[in-house]
Amino acid sequence: MNRHITLKQFRYFLAVAESDSVAAASRMLSIAQSAITKSVLELEDELGLVLFERSPKGMRLTPEGHRFQVKARRVIGAVADATRGVYPSATPLAGGALTIGVTSLVAGYYLSEVFARFRRTCPGVDLKVVEDAPPFLEHLLINGELDIAIMVSNALGEPQALMAETLTRSPNRVWMAADHPLAPQSEVSLAECVQHDLVVLQADRIEVLMRSVWARHQLKPRTVLRTSSLEAVRSLVGVGAGLAVLPDFLYRPWTLDAEHVEVRTLRDAVPTVDVGLVWRRGSQPRAEVLEFIEVARDQSRSRRPVA
């Protein structure tokens, strides 16, 4: 029997994909686990694809599942555009200019969708993007050379001079090779992590956030490499060279050499890494800036699975 894919299936799929289990998706959506399982199985049957790897540890996206996740987010985003609207006025801006700052790490995960949606809704605005390190972006914002930035917003160097609005909060988890000694555990502690070598990502002040965590727990990790390359971290973790503690928005299960990277929940309470909008405190945002804020807010809402 030929069935049609529904928005409900997209939303249930995204909930499972982003929580790694049917049980967690069930709690998130307040929907029975059986309904979510049935919906995902019907979606796989309709597509003729296996979207998840099932195991006692949870549900992990297959390569086909990752590709479908990108498309599903676009569908939900398009529906949000059509039903809620992404700007407060009935007529899109006919002109103007907007300069956005972004860090290299955040650009790869958050910029493209917001950029494309803003271009669709405000095609007359001259849009420019500046990529740089967080301290320089803050300098440009304070000097009025940037209108707004998308960056890690809970580790600002000049918080007294800047305003921040969180778009998403990403929990930190432990990345490890599939055959790592800690892999059989569903949760690991920071104390267990420091018994093994760590690979540290030096980007967007993520290392600064974790450094305070290690200090608070009076732990001294053994670091084998500090690098600004996320792919280097992923590859080294994949071959078993060390663990990494990183936010979920950066996680992908495969390295460039097709090594699998596992993730495990931290037993200890660790601050999230927040990505958000940042602009100069006390400034009066122009119409173009307000439009961009609305687009970014709506994009953030569309990425959250809802019932």
Image: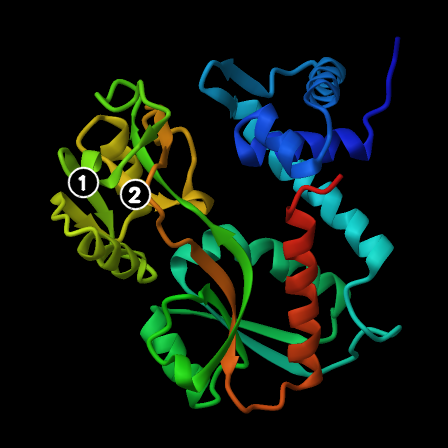
Q: Nearer the viewer, residue 252 or 99?
A: 252
Q: Nearer the viewer, residue 120 or 56?
A: 56
Residue 265: percent from left, percent from top: 38, 35
Q: Residue at x 41, y 64 (%)?
A: 103
Amino acid type indicated by mark 1: Leu
How packed is label 1: few (under 14 Cα within 10 Å), some, or many (20 or more)?
many
Q: Nearer the viewer, residue 304 or 62?
A: 304
Q: CA distance from mark 2 to mark 1?
A: 8 Å
Q: Residue at x 73, y 30 (%)?
A: 31
Residue 76, placed above or below residue 97: above
User: Where does label 1 land, which residue?
Assistant: 198
User: Where does label 2 land, which residue?
Assistant: 245
Mark 2 residue element: strand
- Does the residue at mark 2 contact the one at mark 1 (Cβ under 8 Å)? yes
Residue 239, placed above or below residue 82: above
| Horizontal side, residue 271 vs residue 108: left or right | left
| Horizontal side, residue 159 vs residue 115: left or right | left
| On-image quarter of the N terminus | top right
Q: Nearer the viewer, residue 81 or 304?
A: 304
